[in-house]
Image (cartoon, rainbow, N blue to C red):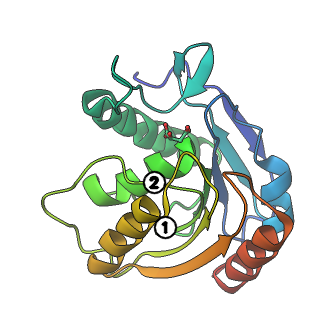
Amino acid sequence: MANEQAHVFFKSGDPAVAPILMLHGTGGDEEDLSKIASYLSPSSPQLGIRGHLIENGQTRYFNHTEDGGFDLESLDSETDWLLEAIDTYSEQYHLNQEKMIVVGYSNGANVAAYAWLAKHPLFKKSVLFHPMVLTQVTTLPDLSNVSLWASHGAQDPIVSKTNFDELMQTLDTAHADISIFEHEQSHNINEPELVSAKAWVTAHLN
Ligand code: MLT
């Protein structure tokens, strides 16, 4: 099985409430976003899956190439790996993927956005903290049943405003429903950002 070595965190919650899937940033782990997820939706069951690649000692959901670009083959196969792992553990913990809200930060947000553009994941909602474009998608999917909240920091050295806007534009062109939060800081998640994300999650729990 492709995902037999997945590192997984599960916290039970109210089975009637949308489950949260947590995808960490570079160097993170499956439990990293649990406190944030508990703040966003206190009664949601939580599933965290660790990216199973290690690059320069840091966990990730896909590799870079040697020249520092994104390795698109790794991105493709690792996204498949992740979606398979989500299937496996959703089944194991009785989580409804149609109702699932993905909470991703940085590398984890990037793989979630890529999944929507290039694969057909069952999840339909997400909170994407500081995502970016990884590659151009030639044929856009129809994302009219997808809703997402995404954030960007004006001083972010990793994600330029142009890059963030391009991702939002692409998702918008694919007819996703988008809410954007911008702060004047960097790649960090700040308090007003969490308050905004919580309001969005509260409105999208059903
Ligand atoms: C990525 O590699 O996905 C982005 O550069 C963000 C990050 O550093 O995790």
Q: Is residue 39 left or right of residue 147?
A: right
SS category of the residue bearing label 2? loop
* Mark 2 neighbour class, 10 Å CA radius: few under 14, some 14 to 19, many 20 or more: many
Q: Nearer the viewer, mark 2 or mark 1?
A: 2
Residue 17 in the image: above or below residue 9: below
Residue 28 in the image: above or below residue 136: above
SS category of the residue bearing label 1? loop
The outermost residue toward the bottom is 203
Residue 43 seen in this snapshot: no
Front-lying residue, 87 or 82: 82
Q: Residue at x 49, y 67 (%)?
A: 98
Quarter of the figure with residue 45:
bottom right
Front-lying residue, 108 or 18: 108
Residue 124: % across, % down? 46, 69
Q: CA distance from mark 2 to mark 1?
A: 24 Å
Q: Residue at x 19, y 66 (%)?
A: 140
Front-lying residue, 129 or 53: 129
The outermost residue toward the top is 57
Q: Is residue 186 left or right of residue 41?
A: left
Residue 158: % across, % down? 54, 45
Label drawn at residue 132 = 2
Residue 109: % across, % down? 54, 52
Residue 193 seen in this snapshot: yes
Q: Residue at x 49, y 33 (%)?
A: 61
**What's under tag 2, amino acid-wise?**
Met
**What's under tag 1, amino acid-wise?**
Glu
Q: Residue at x 55, y 30 (%)?
A: 51
Query: In the image, is the residue at mark 2 within 8 Å of ligand 1 by its beta carbon?
Result: yes
Residue at image mark 1: 98
Quadrant for the C terminus in the image: bottom right
